Amino acid sequence: MKAKVYLETSLVSYITSNPSRDIVVASRQQITQVWWDTQRTRFTLYISPFVIQEASAGDPNAVKRRLSVIRHLPLLEVSEEILALANNLLKDKAIPERSTGDALHLAIAAFHRMDYLLTWNYKHLANAEKRDLITRTIQSNGYNSPIICTPEELMGE
């Protein structure tokens, strides 16, 4: 059975965005494209309504590219339990109050037993200083935390 990966919106954006002149962003775009082209078939990929909502914002041409990439991916359902878990992530300060979307991504990935949450969001998700608090909060609510990582960390051997 393939490992299950929840694609957070930053990953979708990096797959489809125009090449950046910022060297760090350009590197992440390239890593993401290589992962998408060579590694994604090793996993079962999932998105949520939150990814669709976030990917639908902004420049119409960029929106079209983002939605095109994710249109065939399975959509995870949202439940009251997910909303409660997201609220607890905010309440426990595992995720800042102003970052409700990040809490929702984590909650849906945990609730649906994803093995990985793939992201480029270092500020709130792939943040080593927050990892323990995120994991403790998710576990104290009766769920297992997905491994939060970047495409670079999920390249295989």
Image (cartoon, rainbow, N blue to C red):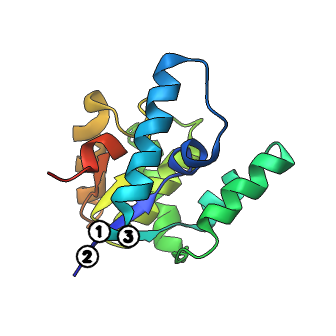
How many other residues sit within 10 Å of disc 2, few (<14), some (14-19) or many (≥20)?
few
Q: Secondary structure at mark 1?
A: helix
Residue type beneath disc 2: Lys
Viewer-closest of 124 and 153: 153
**Which residue lies under the disc numbered 3?**
111
Marks 1,2: beta carbons within 8 A: yes
Q: Say whether residue 100 is left or right of residue 130.
A: right
- Residue 145 visible in the current orientation: yes
Q: Residue 10 at what x, y percent from top left?
A: 54, 44
Q: Foreground residue, 116 or 111?
A: 116
Q: 6 above or below 32?
A: below
**Given this view, does label 2 or label 3 mark the residue nearer the observer?**
2
Q: CA separation, marks 2 and 3?
A: 18 Å
Residue 132 horizontal side relative to residue 47, left or right: left
Residue identifier under label 1 = 42
Q: On the image, numbered disc 2 is attached to which residue? A: 2
> Which residue is nearer to you in this view: 53 or 59?
59
Q: Mark 3 is on which residue type?
A: Phe
